[in-house]
Image (cartoon, rainbow, N blue to C red):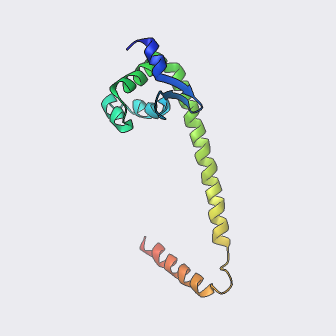
């Protein structure tokens, strides 16, 4: 496959470098390349054609430093997103735990707390 057709097979979208005709980014593929999975496995995992996986791997090899630099930025952003949502969920769970039952549902609330306590003892 020529370099010109590789460039057409890999396009830049708002999501980054993407395999044309798919929503699969090169960063998705890089996760498996970095873990040294074989191309055949990566191809089947993402349901790519032989030409698509060949174009993606060729592009990565030809532009290794650029792709790795962008890949590191993507990983950093993903970690920041994970931390944000983890903190937000922690705050939300704390607010829920502090809530009192609605009037008239105290018995149901006690039953729920007892069941939760039994479950924690079993775990």
On the image, which quarter does residue 121 sit in? Answer: bottom left
On the image, which quarter does residue 62 sit in? Answer: top left
When the figure is inspected, residue 83 is found, relative to residue 12, above or below; the finding is below
The residue lying toward the viewer, choosing from 117 and 100, is 100
Q: Residue at x 55, y 79 (%)?
A: 113
The residue lying toward the viewer, choosing from 4 and 79, is 4
Q: How many marks?
A: 0
Q: Is residue 119 left or right of residue 87?
A: left
Q: Is residue 120 left or right of residue 95?
A: left
> Where, quadrant-wise, is the N terminus in this rendering?
top left
Q: Residue at x 46, y 34 (%)?
A: 28
In x, y percent, where is residue 79? 57, 42
The residue lying toward the viewer, choosing from 83 and 14, is 14
> Where, quadrant-wise, is the C terminus in this rendering?
bottom left
In x, y percent, where is residue 52? 39, 26
Q: Residue at x 36, y 33 (%)?
A: 42
When the figure is inspected, residue 9 is found, relative to residue 91, above or below; the finding is above
Residue at the extreme front of the image, as rendered: 21
In x, y percent, where is residue 73? 58, 31
Q: Residue at x 43, y 32 (%)?
A: 29
């Amino acid at each position: 496959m020529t370099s010109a057709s590789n460039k057409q097979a890999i396009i830049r979208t708002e999501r980054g470098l993407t395999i044309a005709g798919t929503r699969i980014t090169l960063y998705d593929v890089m996760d498996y390349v970095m873990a040294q999975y074989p191309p055949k496995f990566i191809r089947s995992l993402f349901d790519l054609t032989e030409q698509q996986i060949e174009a993606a791997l060729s592009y990565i090899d030809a532009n290794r430093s650029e792709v790795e630099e962008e890949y590191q930025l993507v990983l950093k952003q993903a970690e920041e997103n994970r931390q944000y949502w983890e903190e937000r969920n922690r705050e939300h769970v704390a607010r829920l735990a502090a809530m009192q039952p609605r009037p008239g549902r105290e018995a149901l609330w006690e039953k729920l707390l007892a069941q939760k306590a039994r479950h924690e003892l079993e775990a």
